[in-house]
Image (cartoon, grey):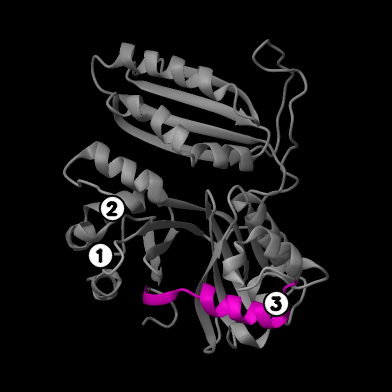
């Protein structure tokens, strides 16, 4: 029997303050352009709700290496900001200055000292992370993009039959699982990495098998990209990024009847974060039920695109409210208020039968599952 202490739980919804760290390495002679771009960016971000402070630091050992840190009341406002089109356009001038960059995000667990300056208020919003999180040694990330209507069958065939790249990145990093789904003309590519996600994504992007795959689907993409143009490729993958905002899993072996599903929740405009928060809270509450058929759940969010990746025993329809993240008093009605009415096929009170129809529509088509317990 699985107990609550035997579960992995990682979430951006715990209310703790967030520290964002951006490591950058500048091209030679790019310093002044970088500083000008940073000044414009910091003046804009200062007015973003939830932003508390930021710092620009230069290495005392290597003048081309810089560090930008920012502090936020909690993770959700930062995620909404960093995923916005406004942010994508704001940081564009920085790209030509950078030889290399890496972004890291941490919730604040402990702090020491009392610093009070005009840029750092004595009493900051947000709370400290209540306790260390328990991980399972894997990092999860996803990409989403759309293809031209009418090309779905061709793209599905390409994605289902590509050659897997080498999974081993280095001594400490390995690509553990890649799952691809389609819903209409939308593609979801979810990955699980053991070790360094950043290193794994770079490794995968350089592999000839993946390069061939990207070139094969390029003509069918709704959003134009030129993979030979670094800026075009960067902007495409920035907009396609679908970060994980919540993960919950039982620390147990998957049974033979466990199946992975990707559920697409089309949020009403501006409701994506609230919807993801509701689903995360529902999964946390359901975790107390040791007989739960949901073995793991990962929620991915970008704007109003919410994807819930679930490993379920016995299928979605055995317990549709639990599988759909709407079990409990008035939870289904709350979920329905946050989702486009067309997803349920009705605009009045929603029933469990409507939930069954929603699951049938939300369940994305599995194209391939590489590295999982039951590869397709």
Residue 165: assigned label: 1
Q: Residue at 31%, 61% (x, y): give it.
A: 147
Q: Residues within 10 Å of mark 2 (few under 14, many from 20)?
A: some
- Between disc 3 and disc 1, the foreground one is 3
User: 310 or 67, which is in the foreground?
Assistant: 310
Labels 3 and 2: the sequence-earlier one: 2
The percent position of residue 356, horizontal first and vertical second, equals: 63, 81
Contact? badges 2 and 1 (CB < 8 Å) = yes
For label 3, the SS is helix
- Give the residue pinned by disc 2: 203
The percent position of residue 123, horizontal first and vertical second, equals: 78, 22
- Between disc 3 and disc 2, the foreground one is 3
Q: Quadrant of residue 276?
A: bottom right
How far, Cα to Cα, is label 3 from label 1?
38 Å
Answer with left or right where residue 12 lies relative to residue 96.
Answer: right
Asked if the magenta segment contains residue 352, the reply would be: yes
Whether residue 23 is situated above or below residue 58 in the rendered picture? below
Labels 2 and 1: the sequence-earlier one: 1
Whether residue 77 is situated above or below residue 341 in the rendered picture? above
For label 2, the SS is helix
Q: Residue at 75%, 73% (x, y): give it.
A: 327
- Give the residue pinned by disc 3: 321
User: 152 or 262, which is in the foreground?
Assistant: 152
The percent position of residue 292, horizontal first and vertical second, equals: 70, 79
Q: Is residue 252 visible?
A: no
Whether residue 69 is situated above or below residue 375 in the rendered picture? above
> Where's the N terminus, which quadrant?
bottom right
Magenta stretch in the rendered image: 349-369
């Amino acid at each position: 029997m699985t107990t609550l202490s035997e579960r992995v739980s990682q979430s951006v919804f715990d209310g703790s303050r967030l520290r964002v760290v951006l490591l950058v390495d500048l091209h030679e002679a790019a310093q002044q352009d970088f500083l000008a771009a940073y000044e414009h960016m910091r003046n804009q971000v200062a007015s973003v709700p939830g932003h508390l402070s930021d710092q620009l630091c230069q290495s005392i050992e290597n003048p081309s290496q810089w560090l930008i840190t920012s502090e936020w009341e909690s993770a959700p406002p930062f995620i909404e900001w960093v995923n916005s089109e406004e942010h994508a356009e704001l940081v564009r001038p920085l790209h030509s200055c950078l030889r290399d960059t890496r972004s890291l995000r941490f919730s604040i667990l402990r702090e020491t000292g009392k610093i009070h300056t005009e840029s750092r208020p004595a009493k900051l919003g947000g709370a400290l992370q209540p306790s260390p999180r328990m991980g399972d040694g894997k990092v999860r990330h996803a990409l989403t993009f759309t293809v031209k209507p009418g090309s779905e069958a061709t793209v599905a065939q390409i994605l289902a039959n590509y050659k897997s790249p080498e999974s081993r990145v280095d001594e400490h990093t390995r690509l553990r699982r890649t799952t691809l789904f389609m819903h209409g003309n939308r593609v979801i590519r979810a990955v699980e990495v053991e070790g360094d996600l950043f290193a794994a994504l770079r490794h995968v992007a350089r592999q000839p098998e993946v390069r061939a795959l990207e070139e094969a689907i390029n003509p069918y993409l709704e959003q134009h990209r030129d993979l030979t143009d670094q800026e075009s490729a960067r902007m495409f993958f920035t907009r396609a990024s679908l970060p994980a905002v919540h993960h919950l899993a039982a620390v147990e072996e998957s049974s033979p009847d466990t199946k992975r599903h990707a559920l697409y929740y089309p949020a009403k405009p501006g409701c994506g974060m609230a919807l993801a928060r509701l689903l995360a809270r529902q999964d946390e509450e359901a975790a107390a039920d040791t007989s739960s058929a949901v073995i793991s759940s990962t929620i991915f969010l970008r704007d109003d695109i919410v994807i819930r990746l679930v490993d379920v025993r016995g299928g979605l329809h055995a317990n549709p409210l639990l599988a759909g993240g709407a079990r409990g008093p008035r939870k289904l009605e709350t979920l329905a208020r946050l989702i486009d009415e067309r997803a349920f096929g009705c605009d009045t009170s929603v029933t469990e039968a409507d939930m069954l129809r929603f699951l049938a529509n939300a369940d994305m088509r599995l194209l391939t599952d590489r590295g999982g317990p039951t590869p397709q």
